[in-house]
Amino acid sequence: MQYRPRLVEPLGESRSDAEIAFAIADELGLSDQFFGGSIDAGREHILKPLGVTLEELKAKPGGINLPLEQRYLRYAEAKDGSVTGFKTETGLVELYSNVLLRQGEPPVPTFLESDLPGNEEYPFALTTTKTGYYCHSQHRNVPSPRKREPDPSVFLSPETADELLLDEGDWADVVTGHGWIRMRVKYDNSLDRRVIRASYGWWQGNSQRKLPGYDPFANGGANYNMPMNGKGLDRDLERRHTGLFPATLCQAIHDDRRGKGQFRGDLPVVSATSRKIRANFTTKIHD
């Protein structure tokens, strides 16, 4: 066990996760539930069951070795003439949750096709998952992983891409009623034709690979939160990133600046004529 002190002063306004969480708690008037606003007091609380103080840990930069008792099958250990069980109301592995039932939620996981969002204007269900190359929104400035995943991506089935006249590698705009982002198209045969999956965590540039950054607060950037809003989230779990949101997908406007950075301007267009070129797909000819 080791205490790792700060080696360099933070750049700009960057702060640790703990500093951010404690500052938010203070603003909400919850400091008394966050050790009086003291991060070190919270660390002392964690260390107390181990019989080690924070000062002792700080005094030994190489760390402290503690014997670790490895225990298996804790649920089967004897306790008060019975077994310990699991930390559920019944002590059993619960596939049916009375806790969720009392909250007015389905007691077992359910899926209905009618639950998929979508309408004539936004026909797809938009979701996201974590990439394997980055740690959430970090490390896109590192050349090696950026070589493997250079651009923000939106995944869809090849059939859906064909219907939308999108090829793999095209830039496409992911649009909801709340905002829009721009990403490269990738095929995913595992996705339902009604589902599109956009990557998240994009903002950093990469100077060594000459790849751009993205304004996290601008429509037309690559911040997955821009097309999102708080409506339709799971009422109790509030999982924004695993929710499904109604969205649509369309070809992006290309220009010569695409290789140098994100285009975020406006282009004046006037619709002159429209022509149906495929079932359920109409194109407009612009001046």
Image (cartoon, rainbow, N blue to C red):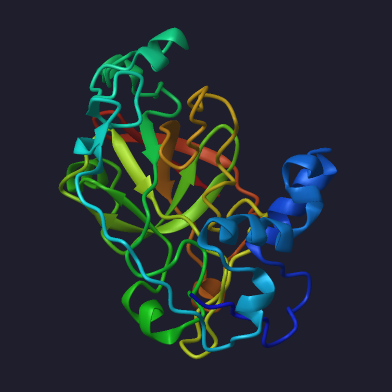
**Vertical side of 178 occupied by 286: above or below:** below
Residue occupying the point 28% across, 24% down: 91
To which quarter of the image does residue 143 belong?
bottom left
How many circles with numbers are drawn on the protein? 0
Horizontally, is 262 left or right of 243 in the view? right
Which residue is outermost to the front? 81
Residue occupying the point 19% across, 37% down: 76
**Vertical side of 52 occupied by 243: above or below:** above
Query: For this rendering, which residue is in front, 47 or 273?
Result: 47
Q: Position of residue 269 (x, y in %)?
A: 60, 47
Q: Position of residue 145 (x, y in %)?
A: 37, 78
**Vertical side of 243 occupied by 37: above or below:** below
To which quarter of the image does residue 38 belong?
bottom right
Query: For this rendering, which residue is in front, 161 or 43?
Result: 43
Would residue 149 be visible to someone looking at this image? yes
Horizontally, is 131 left or right of 27 in the view? left
Q: Position of residue 179 (x, y in %)?
A: 59, 41
Residue occupying the point 68% across, 54% down: 217
Residue occupying the point 50% across, 41% down: 175
Q: Position of residue 194 (x, y in %)?
A: 28, 32
Would residue 265 be visible to someone looking at this image? no
